[in-house]
Amino acid sequence: MTVEKRRYARFHKIEIIRELADLIGEEVDLENPDKILRIEIIGRYAGLSVLAPQDIFSVAKTYG
């Protein structure tokens, strides 16, 4: 699990990870995970991605 946050100061990354990890309730392999849960927090918005270890997370911005 990874957490990236911007413009959000209410909780630290480790606090967010601990709370979410408690909800999963499964044993995990930290060395060779099957999936990675990535949480992006920007201000009051959040997004979740479930990625395979070989996947690349990329955000493309478009301006119009």
Image (tube, grey):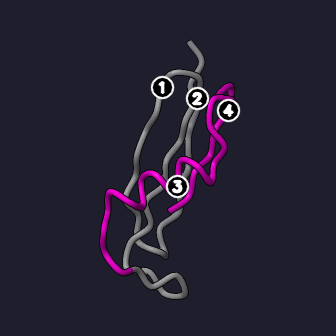
Mark 1 and mark 4: Cα distance apart in space: 10 Å
Task: Judge by depth and name the residue closer to the eye, 60 or 24.
Answer: 24
Q: In the rendered image, which quarter contains the C terminus? A: top right
Camera-nearest label, 2 or 3: 3
Residue assigned mark 1: 45
Mark 4 and mark 3: Cα distance apart in space: 16 Å
Q: Which segment is the magenta one?
A: 1-27
In the image, is 11 to the left or to the right of 26?
right
Rendered view: 15 above or below 44: below
Residue 11 position by quadrant: top right
Task: Judge by depth and name the residue closer to the eye, 34 or 20.
Answer: 20
In the image, is 48 to the left or to the right of 17?
left
Asked whether the beta carbons under mark 1 and mark 2 sit within 8 Å of each other, the answer is yes
Q: Considering the numbered disc 4 on the image, is that residue within a helix, a strand or a loop?
A: strand
The amino acid type, in three-letter code, at marker 4 is Arg
Mark 4 and mark 2: Cα distance apart in space: 5 Å
Residue assigned mark 3: 17
Task: Judge by depth and name the residue closer to the eye, 43 or 53.
Answer: 43
Q: Considering the numbered disc 3 on the image, is that residue within a helix, a strand or a loop?
A: helix
Q: Position of residue 51 (x, y in %)?
A: 41, 64
Asked whether the beta carbons under mark 4 and mark 2 sit within 8 Å of each other, the answer is yes
Mark linked to residue 42: 2
Q: Position of residue 12 (x, y in %)?
A: 66, 43
The amino acid type, in three-letter code, at marker 2 is Ile
Residue assigned mark 4: 6
Mark 1 and mark 2: Cα distance apart in space: 5 Å
Mark 3 and mark 1: Cα distance apart in space: 17 Å
Rendered view: 18 above or below 33: above
Q: Considering the numbered disc 1 on the image, is that residue within a helix, a strand or a loop?
A: strand
* Residue at (62% x, 54% y) in the render: 14
Asked whether the beta carbons under mark 1 and mark 4 sit within 8 Å of each other, the answer is no
